[in-house]
Image: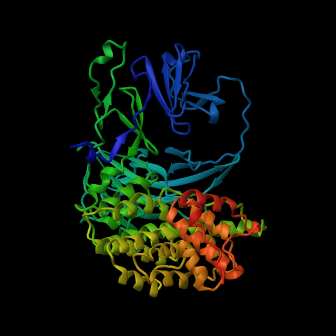
Amino acid sequence: MGEEDYYLELCERPVQFEKANPVNCVFFDEANKQVFAVRSGGATGVVVKGPDDRNPISFRMEDKGEVKCIKFSLENKILAVQRTSKTVVLPEKRSLKLLKSQNINVNWYMYCPESAVILLSTTVLGNVLQPFYFRAGTMTKLPKFEIELPAAPKSTKLNFSERDIAMAIIYGQLYVLFLRHHSRTSNSTGAEVVLYHLPREGACKKMHILKLNRTGKFALNVVDNLVVVHHQDTETSVIFDIKLRGEFDGTVTFHHPVLPARSIQPYQIPVAGPAPVTSQSPVPCKLYSSSWIVFQPDIIISASQGYLWNLQVKLQPIVNLLPDKGRLMDFLLQRKECKMVILSVCSQMLSESDRATLPVLATVFDKLNHEYKKYLDAEQSYTMAVEAGPSRSSPLLKRPLRTQAVLDQSDMYTHVLSAFTEKKEMPHKFVIAVLMEYIRSLNQFQIAVQHYLHELVIKTLVQHNLFYMLHQFLQYHVLSDSKPLACLLLSLESFYPPAHQLSLDMLKRLSTANDEIVEVLLSKHQVLAALRFIRGIGGHDNISARKFLDAAKQTEDNMLFYTIFRFFEQRNQRLRGNPNFTPGEHCEEHVAFFKQVFGEQALMRPTTF
């Protein structure tokens, strides 16, 4: 398999620690995500490393027997060591205060540091779980719930292990994941993962079932809100996305793997040692090894090799593995690093080889603009709330977070549509249809269309001499009125004479002040268009000659300058009986320039009767 087929990979820079051996014991602290390598019970050293720790922590402690567990408090302030089943030692002398106690028979426990919830397994069978929530030094008892076991067990012994349970935050909600090795329904073969939603308030509820369609040894991770299920026997993994549409039976939603099962991308372990020795090739890492231990949310540890990895999802390979573009977009829009991949998918759909149909493109544009609109609405609500000022009823204002799923018009214009319109091999009717489909989608979500998209449509129509279509688009207001658009139309007058009137009509509809229209045209170097416009409304006797001559000179078009200069000479003659400019018009510089370029003899002579 090529690299483009693997959609899961181990991170490039793992945490390295001393391998587990008879002298060196390895422990992992899930709260701080730290690995402890304890040599000789700590007497010959303890080394602590975490994914974000630039400098490992090293220290020694007295060997007072086998260490069963060792952890730091948050921010590495207090060390706790457990050597027997009933005692925890703090090497530094500190006084402890009992805040709260609960009498409960516990088989085993599990803690989720991200949500500060502990889960206790109670009862003889162990399948009644009691959660507690910690916050600011207080402990809150949440409603207990029962995990449905595969079938009524014959024995009354504990047959429910913490190995089959995981806790993770998925899409901002806390879930308890139960790996059920045999389905409860007799007609279904294979294991399944049952997701129980554990809210802060209210009862825990069974929400999703992930169908694995196989049996054997499994391990669970959660990466980028995806549930990853590793299968040791086949050395492959599958991913599930609970946001994608599944089969709902009225109570729970059943999900199948998003993609075909694939192995994690092969990983090479670099050979350590002095430089001359390390020239030998790296050693392939044994994936899905029996020595692997998986921790939530995304950690894989190989104690025998001395590595801690974060598992990662690769989005680009998924593009080719998920042919349904609508489903692909639903999947990508939920991922953290999705923007450039989505833009590449859009470009791919507009390529000659993989050209998508208009209905498929419409579906994709609608999905993108749905996310875009949600963000715009949230941003608008935030702005209005800020302007309204703080109130007792409104909670603390938080600016909406712009995720990579928000692809605005400038993203689509810059990375997709602009390049697409320049493709010579594309049928122009398809190009225009795609642009109009994107504009239709924006309109459907009541998103104001940026003028540069309309300009792209007009330029494409003009390029292919489709003036009748341009006229229709403007006549039926398919293209929204805007000043930049009106200026673009004015510039088209030489190719398409009706464009002049279409432009003026648009500016009038926009209730644009006449002098503003002139300013806009001059700023776009449309000097003749500005002059024609001002003559059209009968204001040419009062305009500033200097302003028009300045603009004409800036175009560096001498013949244009000559035309404008001659126009004002004629105006002077008509109004004052003399073509010369008065000192108050401040046109001396332009008269000098005219003489320099065309000679003094080109100046108009006063007409005498």
Residue 129 vertical position relative to residue 374 in the rendered view, above or below: above
Where's residue 179, x and y in %?
A: 37, 52
Is 169 situated left or right of 541 in this image? left
Q: Identify the residue at the far front of this view.
A: 609
Residue 376 vertical position relative to residue 105 in the rendered view, above or below: below
Query: Which residue occupies the foreground of this view, 535 or 337?
Result: 535
Q: Looking at the rendering, in which quadrant would you find the C terminus?
A: bottom right
Where's residue 303, x and y in %?
A: 39, 28
Where's residue 222, x and y in %?
A: 43, 49
Is 586 situated left or right of 372 in this image? right
Snapshot quadrant of residue 241: bottom left
Total labels: the figure holds 0
Q: Which residue is at a point 61% across and 61% down the rendered structure image? A: 400
Q: Is residue 524 visible?
A: no
Query: Which residue occupies the foreground of this view, 345 or 560?
Result: 560
Q: Which residue is at a point 37% across and 80% down the rendered structure image? A: 467
Is 497 situated left or right of 511 in this image? left
What sort of colour scheme is used for the picture?
Answer: rainbow
Where's residue 87, x and y in %?
A: 60, 30
Q: Is residue 559 visible?
A: yes
Query: Which residue occupies the foreground of this view, 417 or 520?
Result: 520
Q: Looking at the rendering, in which quadrant would you find the N terminus?
A: top left
Is 515 situated left or right of 191 in this image? right
Query: Which residue occupies the foreground of this view, 23 or 114?
Result: 114
